[in-house]
Amino acid sequence: MNIQMLGTGSAFAKRYYNNNALLFSGGQTAMLDCGITAPLALHQLSKTFNDIDALVISHIHADHVGGMEEFAFQRKFVYQRSLPLFVPAPLIEPLWETTLKGGLMQEDLRSLDDYFDVRPLQEGESCEIIPGLTIRPIRTKHIAGKPSYSYVMNGSFFYSADMKFDAELLHALVAEGCEVIFHDCQLKPPGVVHTTLEQLLSLPVDLQERIWLMHYDDTRPHYEGMTGAMRFVEQHHVYSF
Ligand SMILES: Nc1ccn([C@@H]2O[C@@H]3COP(=O)(O)O[C@H]3[C@H]2O)c(=O)n1
Ligand SMILES: [Zn+2]
Ligand SMILES: [Zn+2]
């Protein structure tokens, strides 16, 4: 599997774009989260929404779903091609009712199914989203009352999306075979809804060596050389795992 970040920034970052990813496997492309900056980020990679074969969503914050209205409209009216939307079951109703309905609702198009080929994901169950790429959602802590999911891919790659620090989970993932971890990282404490750099630095070095930092704010240049054995994920770089 290859992964290329459309952006690596926090929700309010202006230099790094929203923390969204492209996943490549078996000749197909999946997008993991589609935030406000995703349409421009795709364009800057000379890609269009027609180049995407599947969309996966982690949770309903605009830096992760704010580009979905354009995605839906373009696939429906420009490319006239359906899009498999892999979404944890508890997010399906709020994704439509609280996020997309306002822009997408019209007389003849009244539900998420009218725009997407909705494929519900169940927590803990693996699902192949494009050839050779399976994802397994894990519900992780982010904000009270707001379901949020991280993903294990092909059993060996963990993508946190947005989550509070959970050392126990990280250790358990490594024990079950996770080799690489892309983790959100709030550079400056307190980490009320995210994991802070300080918390990640408390992990043993052999675990830090597996961790790549993403979802960081515009102050990242001040933290070069201050991340222990952890590396920053770079926007647009293609990583093979
Ligand atoms: N209870 C909350 C809710 C949100 N936030 C901030 O808003 C951002 C929304 O996107 P995010 O990437 O989850 O990061 C959240 C916090 O910066 C926050 O700090 N506290
Ligand atoms: Zn976020
Ligand atoms: Zn969030």
Image (tube, rainbow, N blue to C red):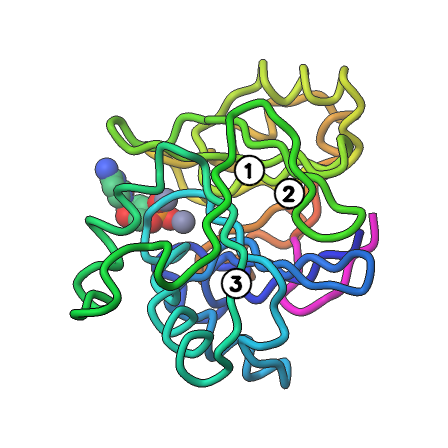
Secondary structure type for disc 3: loop
**Magenta segment, prevailing SS (helix, strand or loop):** loop
| Position of residue 45 in the picture relative to residue 239 (left or right) | left
Q: Is mark 1 within 8 Å of ligand 2?
A: no
Instruction: Name the residue at 82% across, 58% down.
Output: 26
Q: Which residue is mark 2?
A: 182
Residue 126 image position (x, y, % from top left): 66, 31
- The front one of 108 and 133 is 108
Q: Nearer the viewer, residue 155 or 9?
A: 155
**Residue 213 showing in the rendered view:** yes
In depth, the one of 19 and 126 nearer the eye is 126
**Residue linked to disc 3:** 83
Question: Can you identify the residue that label 1 sits on?
Answer: 160
Q: Position of residue 139 (x, y in %)?
A: 46, 26
Q: Is residue 62 left or right of residue 18?
A: left
Task: Give SS at disc 1.
Answer: loop
Which badge, 2 or 1, is on the more N-terminal residue?
1
The image quarter containing residue 156 is top right
Query: Start and end of the magenta stretch?
Result: 233-241
